[in-house]
Image: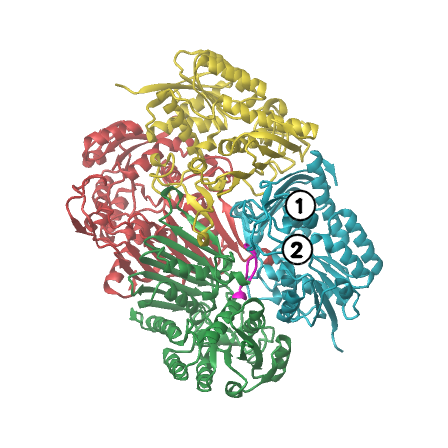
Chain colours: A green, B red, C cyan, D yellow
Amino acid sequence: MAEKTVRVGIIGTGFMGKAHSNAWLKVNKFFTPGATAVMKTACDVAEEPLKAFAANWGWEQTCTDWRKLVESKDIDLVDICTPNNTHAEIATAAAKAGKHILCEKPLAMSVAECEGMVKAVKKAGVQNLVSFSYRRVPAVALAKRIVEEGRLGRIFHVRAVYLQDWIIDPEFPLVWRLKKEIAGSGAHGDLNAHIIDMSRWLVGEIKSLVGMTETFIKERPELAEAGAGLSAAKAKGKGEVTVDDATLFLARFENGAVGTFEATRFAQGRKNGNRIEINGEKGSLVFAFERMNELELFSAEDPPHLQGFRTILATEPSEHAYISAWWPPGHIIGYEHTFINQAADILQAVAEDKPLQPDFADATKTQAVLDAVLKSAEEDKWIDV
Amino acid sequence: MAEKTVRVGIIGTGFMGKAHSNAWLKVNKFFTPGATAVMKTACDVAEEPLKAFAANWGWEQTCTDWRKLVESKDIDLVDICTPNNTHAEIATAAAKAGKHILCEKPLAMSVAECEGMVKAVKKAGVQNLVSFSYRRVPAVALAKRIVEEGRLGRIFHVRAVYLQDWIIDPEFPLVWRLKKEIAGSGAHGDLNAHIIDMSRWLVGEIKSLVGMTETFIKERPELAEAGAGLSAAKAKGKGEVTVDDATLFLARFENGAVGTFEATRFAQGRKNGNRIEINGEKGSLVFAFERMNELELFSAEDPPHLQGFRTILATEPSEHAYISAWWPPGHIIGYEHTFINQAADILQAVAEDKPLQPDFADATKTQAVLDAVLKSAEEDKWIDV
Amino acid sequence: MAEKTVRVGIIGTGFMGKAHSNAWLKVNKFFTPGATAVMKTACDVAEEPLKAFAANWGWEQTCTDWRKLVESKDIDLVDICTPNNTHAEIATAAAKAGKHILCEKPLAMSVAECEGMVKAVKKAGVQNLVSFSYRRVPAVALAKRIVEEGRLGRIFHVRAVYLQDWIIDPEFPLVWRLKKEIAGSGAHGDLNAHIIDMSRWLVGEIKSLVGMTETFIKERPELAEAGAGLSAAKAKGKGEVTVDDATLFLARFENGAVGTFEATRFAQGRKNGNRIEINGEKGSLVFAFERMNELELFSAEDPPHLQGFRTILATEPSEHAYISAWWPPGHIIGYEHTFINQAADILQAVAEDKPLQPDFADATKTQAVLDAVLKSAEEDKWIDV
Amino acid sequence: MAEKTVRVGIIGTGFMGKAHSNAWLKVNKFFTPGATAVMKTACDVAEEPLKAFAANWGWEQTCTDWRKLVESKDIDLVDICTPNNTHAEIATAAAKAGKHILCEKPLAMSVAECEGMVKAVKKAGVQNLVSFSYRRVPAVALAKRIVEEGRLGRIFHVRAVYLQDWIIDPEFPLVWRLKKEIAGSGAHGDLNAHIIDMSRWLVGEIKSLVGMTETFIKERPELAEAGAGLSAAKAKGKGEVTVDDATLFLARFENGAVGTFEATRFAQGRKNGNRIEINGEKGSLVFAFERMNELELFSAEDPPHLQGFRTILATEPSEHAYISAWWPPGHIIGYEHTFINQAADILQAVAEDKPLQPDFADATKTQAVLDAVLKSAEEDKWIDV
């Protein structure tokens, strides 16, 4: 009997379109998830670059109208890689059409949008996964396992930052990510979304919080035309930055833990500085993305004279999640592998008809935290999530 | 001509009394600050242990009444190493008696107390230094120099934590440091005081903040009698912990930077985790006390293909503050050396009659931040400092 | 005009066959080297697994006789991924047939074999590249650039190790890699080959050396049958290990530098511990594969008070080799990417008809060092290379 | 009953004289070894600086003739801090006079000299300790404990380096340490001595070895006059460097382990880079002096998914050697503390009349290795120790 196939239609061919295409291309070459991905259709608005994109990655056909794609009979799974302000509409339509959905993060522009999406996928009974792909880093999966094994005990502290440095230059132009109407928010939705998701997954739900936002550079050169490359003439003068450059907040978790969170694009020298530290009664964990194959663990259950933070290289095929599909010990994997691991997981979920996390309902909780932070920042006070 | 001598009287013979005695003992053997410390009088309440302490460290005489010490004609400098709730009274009396003062941190129990102390030392015209001794770590002094050289440019972020783990065990007893009436606060005054001082020194004044406190273990075994050792019978049942186990806050600086601060005694595996990171337009710095001989620097002015965080081992006699008094490159110094460096600085200040920082006025600003955090935590809102 | 195509035939479908197939699959999706790889034919001895392998990776056809493959008119480039003792015969035949050749390392079993291969490729005028793929790590390419920019000055020291730990268990069976007649040597040819290549590339030629070998576990369980999996019954008793578990040597370079080299499979905790440190008059470099995206640099030309080893995260698209094909800064790549980078280089070399390093002639010099070490170890004396 | 006193006479007031004086000054203030050091007499050849030195450190009296000191009735222990070529004569005389002896390393200029010294101290029955003070680093003492607890199992590898960089500049003058007649050897006796001692202590005796030496800068500016400071006029032209700048060797241990050793003063950026790694069947250890409060441990007995190198901060008063005398956890100690810990050990040995290691007999074995390396380098062959 031939293995089940999952015909994928991808919408959006930018940075995430590239990362996801690579994942669909490779997933069945390394994993045997019980279903085979077929790279069926790629969709974007501009026809010429779309055709080149599809040819490069091996998508069988193209389509410039996402509505046609989501309704097409030869698509089983819709992969949404478009800007944040389009997720809700596309996902809802896809759900109505009975398609499984993989959606880039953050799930949508607001909790209200998310809730509509959750309703749609529940009604349709389709697989729905939000691409918080860092959950698929083997070292992060190991962190989850350590927590579940009870090795940290009661959690006291979460200390999470996501630090980048790519817009410090005041002459960096006003790209769409710096416009609220398209991006929703700045560093917050882009970066805090990840560390909120990871904290919720590893520690539990956030109960209340107080936050602040800051925009260090308030005006930037307009791009000559929408969508033009960064090298385009910047003759149109300056425009207002309408999103946050940095967003910080304090949080109380339902289980009594307390936390600090910080996202910024102004931390000189930090390139992709997603770092989380968790301190529990019996142990502590540290994960930092730039060394994503490593997890630091302190265990108060080690012999007293031998306690210390150990660096676990999470590359053992027999011990660490996903690694048996990859390379021998110490032969590290990279950023792109998180997407391939994720693709394997969703194929398996489809094949076995089993639920998968973080689904839309789960991501709605992350969105609720994101929303609460902005509200708190606006109102200068503590907010219950 | 004989060098000036500075006759020191120390009050308090606990942990800090030990660290300061060691400093007075060694300072003139390594430094030539222009004045010589004479270890004149040691003072504490219990006569027997005091005599043993004085004999061990070479204090010439003892005295169980601090008032006599501060008024004695054979004392030039009073070194206050007593619990926080006694600083104000002692320092004020010492100032009135015309003595130079070195006072342990935090300066006092409140800004109001501090202001009285400032008034007293200003009127007396005496040297007054608060023992934020981490400013005397060569790597921290190097951080200051780097900031002053303009190598960071405009500062965007401060990220400061002071993490310890020594009271996680719920059976750890209710020592005086966990009682508000003596200690004033818990992790906050003990640990945040240091990172606030360091941030103010390196970055500037804090304008407003929002904070929270948490006491994870709300009751602990009472010690059998006040002042009894930890091994004493713990038969008295449980008593309430009246200070914070952890205090966190967000801050806005006057120069536009934003910051996160966190002090805790519940970070498993962090022994003396005083760590501060500063991100500026042109560079970033990281200092972590457990590797106190090192400073990390990222410079965006390095050639683009060679940029990265470098670890400066601040042990070069010809380059780094204080080191010419110590050992060859790479032969590291430790915690106690911060006190000896500090002793050298205050002897030099006395010898040259020059002001020294952080003086009482400066430490009052740190106290104002400490107070504002607790007020903010109580009132659940942002506070202007 | 259609771009040039390079029809690839791969021989050998083990670990390296997998790594190379992945490279051919992906190279043109990320790079535009001026020629397109076509995955034409896969070859191995066992037909069934071969067919599965080819189907998985998308090789168009299969073939169980490597001679047919190398002589086939529809192959432009032969990719040799077979055990070391077959390289010479296959490569020589491929050269005679006018094919370009990519050959796994080490090039052959002896310098004599290598020299025959060099002769063949020179006569044929074909591209010939040995897969010392670590040269294609961006951080290693950066090291080369730093050396060429003169930032180290005269080199004094090389300190290279390649440490693994996978055969410490005495019950680990007698696999082919532990048999001299197939593998040629043990840790030496497998691991020292890499660090010799890297040292020669970055520092220069080795003039003389003295080496030693050690086999810690002299007998191991025989596999039930040749080629059987590790889980097969191990009923045949013990057999002799005929290769080195560890090989160490001291070296003098032609330019006056001195070096230590060490390869072992008995360094507990070191999974893929390929580490090289180079000390020069003006600076030092450190590369360690387990953190392959990083390069450490010390520059004595930095301001004296700011000198220190900096960690360069070699992931800047605009600055670091190969990265513009991959992901944004800080989004690290992994082991497999070295092979894809290498595939891009050889496609470009074919497209532009330009020579590429390390070619067979260059790898012969590495082989000469490998041979000299074993001779030295056997004769217990210094040997000129 | 008054505690036993040990009246110390120190010979040599240079770098080591300073480090030892500091140790005698402090030892009884922090430790209670059962005997009290009395700083009796300091001895050196130049009277004026000697008097200043004695006054600074509190030596009761001075003496410019070491023979008088060693024979004096008011001295119990002779502390030898003079250049290497004087150790044998002084120590032998001190032993004859019945004094306990602490002698700086390396013990002497040759095994022959050492053997005479051993004979003398054995005959006299006095305490005799060689100042390989790195054995008194708490992290190194922990390494010893870990080995003795059997946590490494059979040892396979030792990898030891001692890297410095202070004479790379060709204009650095021809100080006495670069003259064979005074120093015996260069980096070898100065640095390899330490790592040989540490390896012997932690792993066992070296059976055979092959070594090489290199002098990168063969001539240097003569100092204007012997003993003149580095800033003295360098008008005398160039003189020959007669010691090694770097010495490397391979070794076989009696227990079957193999090792690499390297000492150099030409490793740019390495200030005091004393680093040793040991790989055993069940675990591995790494110690690096520039982070001397830390010990790295890998244990193959940890749960398989949690294995990794852990960094033990060896500053726990209740767990780690010597620390209970010092400061709270995480409040690190420095280079100078190794000498104070050592002073405590020898006072205790005297008080309890117990033997102490490394004694002269033990240090003779280190000297035998040092001598064998130079012989091997001269004869270009393997040597049995």
Which mark sits nearer the N-terminus, 2 or 1? 2
Identify the secondary structure beneath mark 1: loop
Nearest to the observer: residue A164 or residue B36? A164
Measure the C-alpha gap from mark 2 to mark 1: 21 Å
Q: Residue at x 43, y 47 (%)?
A: B140
Residue A335 highlighted magenta (yes or no) = yes
- Residue that carries the numbered disc 2 in the rendered image: C135
Q: Residue at x 72, y 52 (%)?
A: C85
Image position, residue A22 (x, y; %): 57, 71
Image position, residue D113 (x, y; %): 57, 18
Tell if the residue under mark 2 belongs to the same chain as the one under mark 1. Answer: yes
Say left or right for A361 vs D371: left
Say left or right for B354 vs D286: left
Relative height, residue C110 to residue C382 (above, below): below
Nearest to the observer: residue C208 or residue B84? C208
Quadrant location of the N terminus of chain D in the rendered image: top left
Magenta span: predominant SS is: loop
Identify the secondary structure beneath mark 2: helix
Q: Residue at x 34, y 58 (%)?
A: A157
Residue type at the position of mark 2:
Arg
State whether residue C30 appears in this view. no
State whether residue A93 appears in this view. yes
Residue C245 highlighted magenta (yes or no) = no
Residue type at the position of mark 1:
Gly
- Residue that carries the numbered disc 1 in the rendered image: C153
Quadrant location of the C terminus of chain D in the rendered image: top right
Instruction: State which region is magenta.
Output: A326-337
Nearest to the observer: residue A368 or residue A134? A134
Nearest to the observer: residue C289 or residue A380? C289
Image position, residue A121 (x, y; %): 41, 81
